[in-house]
Image (tube, rainbow, N blue to C red):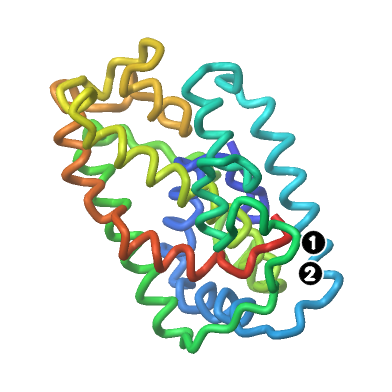
Amino acid sequence: MHESLRELPLNLKEAIDWLFIVSRSGAIFRLAAYVRGVLVDSNPTEPRQHYISNLNAKVKEALSQWPLAETSEFQKILKLYEPTHNDSKVAKCLGLDDDEEKNVNPMVKYEVTPWQVERYLNNCVKHFKGLLRRIMKPGHYRSSYSKWANWRSDCEYDPQECANLFISVLPLVHASLELLYEYCSHWNYRGQMITDTRENHLGSYFEALGFDPKEDFKEGVDGGDAAESLMFARWDFLERMRMLCGFWVYY
């Protein structure tokens, strides 16, 4: 369990938990303002580039030690996480072509306001809550962060660091949501139970993203049911997420 919001989320479940705590702390607008500040910064400083590069290294190292790291399901997710992979959802998130990684302009500018970012993040919270209500047993939600973790104690004295941390995991969130929606809505998986964690079965993908399907998921919920709750993770929603992580060329 993570003790602080300054500890990096390492999968989709932990990223959702992190954002829930920020929301409960009443700090979504604070987070949005600093995320927006990164987007419109036309001259990223060397310390920030160095910080983000270090975060990237920490994420990859921690992911490689995840208990499910050797499963085929997790390997598929890791490949989506690599900007150099041919089918990379992260490359899409970064706006890169296959051979363009080294030449992309890092100074992406968007005419975006803090209120627009806040609205998007609040929508993320709403959609994630809807998904969890659909798939999880009542009373079985367990946060991967301590009850003592909150914005005031962990982030208020350095909100930029928490914003950078959040942005650093957006490519993983993007890849994970796109993968889940694709699999849950695919005809091969729509009839599978999300509690089935056998290899290459639907529950194993949820498991690889940090969930505990056997313990926490409702019985009788299949891929089609989950797909209905993941319909938000389509082009327009993911396009806005790409907007938030599109500058992130140092990943």
Q: Residue at x 33, y 17 (%)?
A: 201
**Where does the image place residue 19, in percent across and percent down from the top left?**
46, 57
Which residue is disc 1 drawn over?
Answer: 51
Q: Would you say 23 lies left or right of 106 here?
A: left
Residue projecting furthest to the front: 99
Q: Are marks 1 and 2 in contact (CB under 8 Å)?
A: yes
Q: Quadrant of the N terminus?
A: top right
Q: Nearer the viewer, residue 212 or 78?
A: 78
**11 to the left or right of 199:** right
Q: Write the residue at 39% across / 39% down.
A: 179
- Residue at 62% x, 70% y is 247
Question: Can residue 22 be seen in this snapshot?
Answer: yes
Q: Quadrant of residue 107?
A: bottom right
Give the residue type that dot 1 points to.
Tyr
Compared to residue 61, the image places residue 204 above or below, namely above
Q: Is residue 88 above or below residue 91?
A: above
Residue 70 appears at what percent x and percent y? 60, 17
Task: Let me know if residue 148 appears in the view.
Answer: no
How many C-alpha atoms fall within 10 Å of the one at disc 2: few (<14), some, or many (≥20)?
A: some
Residue 188, horizontal then vertical, whole percent: 22, 23
Residue 172 as seen in the image, left or right of residue 99: left
Query: What residue sits right under mark 2 in the picture?
Result: 48
Image quadrant occupied by the C terminus: bottom right
Q: What residue lies at 19% left-to-right and 40% top-to-bottom?
A: 134
